[in-house]
Image (cartoon, rainbow, N blue to C red):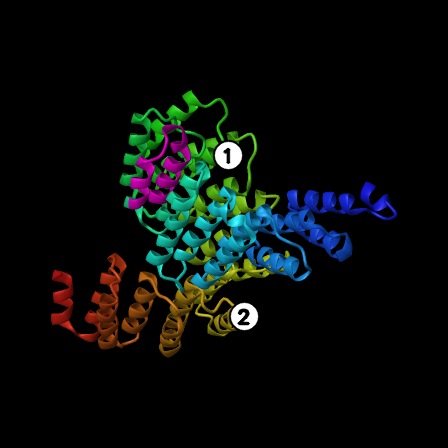
């Protein structure tokens, strides 16, 4: 209001408003003030505020474009500009040439020898290594080369490099680097390793890392506990999870949001809904993660009645809330309700993401609603989600349930990548509709691609062999 009352706001006032809006997360108003500011009144500080705002709001493309626009307008980026822009680039980078281009620009400007900029470059190379368009090993080598060249490494330098190794599955390299760190800098690195193991489903390794951490005299913190609890929850280690819970209550004066949310997941995943509800309703404040954790628990265990009540109780919902509920209704046979809820979500102003479309397509599969499924398929393409793995898998199943095997096959063939769910869906589609021999061929192709079959794979291929009278092949797969 004070800003609006200034007849001719100066550079300082405008920069202050841009920074304030960015800090509060209102990037739309920040952009408006920025764009209404004449180029002659802008400076590097204002551009930095916008770039940082975009990065903090996970809009990497806009952060990078703002840097390019800044240079076109004749403003020189400084160290802070490159650190912020590179953080934005790390959110969206996919090709090695982008890493090299920005690396060269940073060096040319003189910012390529500043620790914060080099840390950001390590992050960019590491994130790009995870892209399907890049070669992981060469990019991780580039990240390590930048790391080794940092003259004064701080805690973030070490943690960023270790996180890069972990997210690309190079745990041995991460552990080796961890061993070379100063003891007083190891906490964040341990947390990165533990979180990485949990994310990859390596729960025993995560718990072993916790034991090493404790034996080294390093105290668990508010970020360690949730990772440990998630490992216990997914591995079904209720007793150990309860011990960690008790330990946290003894050691911590204030239990964090993250720990409470993880505890809700622990208890519902282990079938202890009374304990999960008790923790949830005792929480002094709840965020979306809290509500969605309990909602997901109800849905995944088939307690749809309780899920519906909790969904209605929620005063605010985010896109994940709607996705959990729509998917839960579909997976529990309530396809019609799932489609109605998808329509309600659209009316509430939520733009569906690929996972939301996947949930709606699952509802079509339950109903055998071929026409609705085709419409959602068209919308997926229109929204640019046709390359989504989850949506592709849902489409294969939907077309199969509707009896249109050829459409299911075409979706599979046009998908840029596949996981075991994709292969299982196609094998099931072919087997269920009398194409047993083709289902077996697809299974053999899956093995050649190096995809490890799971329990569902064996069930679908054995069913296909049974329907097609392929007794000997079925017996061979069963014995394997």
Q: Please tell me the numbered disc located at residue 257.
A: 1
**Is residue 127 found left or right of 216 in the rendered image?**
right
Main secondary structure found in the magenta portion: helix
- Coordinates of residue 99 in the picture (x, y in percent): 46, 58
Q: Which residue is mark 2?
A: 379
- Coordinates of residue 103 in the picture (x, y in percent): 48, 55
Magenta stretch: give its range: 173-198
The residue depicted at 20 percent of the width and 66 percent of the height is 462
**Is residue 74 found left or right of 404 in the rendered image?**
right
- Coordinates of residue 91 in the picture (x, y in percent): 50, 54
Q: Nearer the viewer, residue 323 or 220?
A: 220
Q: Is residue 352 visible?
A: yes
Vertical order, 372 against 57 (above or below)? below
The residue depicted at 73 percent of the width and 46 percent of the height is 15
The residue depicted at 50 percent of the width and 34 percent of the height is 257
Vertical order, 267 against 296 (above or below)? above
Q: Nearer the viewer, residue 204 or 433?
A: 204
Q: Please tell me the numbered disc located at residue 304.
A: none
**Is residue 320 found left or right of 450 in the rendered image?**
right
Vertical order, 369 against 4 (above or below)? below
- Coordinates of residue 237 in the picture (x, y in percent): 30, 36
In the image, which is nearer the foreground, mark 2 or mark 1?
Answer: 1
């Amino acid at each position: 209001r004070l800003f609006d009352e200034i007849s001719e706001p100066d550079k300082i006032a405008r920069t202050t408003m841009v920074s304030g809006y960015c800090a509060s997360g209102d990037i739309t108003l920040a952009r408006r003030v920025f764009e209404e500011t004449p180029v002659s009144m802008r400076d590097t500080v204002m551009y930095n505020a916008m770039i940082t705002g975009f990065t903090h709001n996970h809009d990497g493309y806009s952060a990078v474009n703002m840097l390019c626009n800044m240079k076109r307008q004749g403003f020189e980026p400084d160290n802070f500009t490159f650190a912020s822009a590179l953080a934005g680039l790390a959110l969206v980078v996919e090709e090695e040439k982008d890493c090299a281009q920005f690396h060269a620009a940073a060096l040319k400007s003189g910012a390529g020898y500043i620790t914060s900029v080099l840390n950001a470059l390590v992050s960019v190379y590491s994130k790009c290594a995870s892209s399907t368009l890049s070669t992981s090993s060469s990019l991780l080598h580039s990240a390590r080369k930048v790391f080794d060249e940092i003259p004064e490494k701080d805690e973030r330098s070490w943690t960023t490099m270790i996180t890069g190794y972990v997210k690309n599955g190079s745990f041995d390299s991460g552990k080796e680097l961890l061993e070379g760190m100063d003891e007083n800098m190891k906490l964040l690195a341990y947390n990165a390793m533990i979180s990485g193991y949990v994310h990859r489903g390596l729960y025993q390794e995560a718990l072993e890392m916790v034991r090493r951490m404790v034996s080294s005299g390093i105290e668990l913190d508010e970020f360690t506990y949730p990772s440990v609890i998630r490992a216990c929850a997914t591995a079904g280690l209720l007793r150990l999870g309860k011990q960690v819970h008790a330990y946290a209550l003894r050691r911590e004066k204030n239990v964090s949001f993250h720990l409470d949310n993880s505890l809700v997941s622990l208890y519902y995943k282990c079938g202890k809904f009374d304990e999960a509800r008790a923790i949830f309703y005792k929480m002094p404040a709840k965020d979306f993660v809290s509500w969605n954790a309990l909602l997901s628990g109800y849905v995944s265990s088939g307690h749809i009645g309780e899920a519906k009540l909790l969904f209605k109780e929620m005063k605010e919902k985010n896109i994940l809330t709607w996705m959990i509920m729509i998917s839960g209704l579909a997976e529990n046979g309530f396809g019609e309700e799932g489609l109605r809820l998808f329509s309600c979500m659209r009316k509430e102003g939520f733009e569906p993401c690929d996972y939301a479309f996947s949930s709606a397509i699952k509802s079509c599969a339950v109903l055998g609603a071929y026409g609705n499924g085709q419409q959602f398929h068209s919308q997926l393409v229109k929204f640019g989600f046709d390359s989504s793995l989850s949506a592709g898998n849902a489409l294969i199943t939907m077309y199969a349930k509707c009896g249109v095997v050829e459409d299911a096959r075409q979706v599979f063939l046009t998908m840029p990548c596949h996981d075991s769910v994709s292969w299982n869906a196609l094998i099931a589609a072919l087997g269920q509709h009398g194409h047993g021999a083709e289902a077996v061929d697809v299974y053999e192709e899956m093995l050649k691609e190096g995809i490890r079959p799971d329990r569902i794979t064996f069930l679908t291929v054995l069913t296909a062999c049974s329907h097609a009278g392929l007794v000997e092949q079925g017996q061979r797969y069963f014995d394997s």
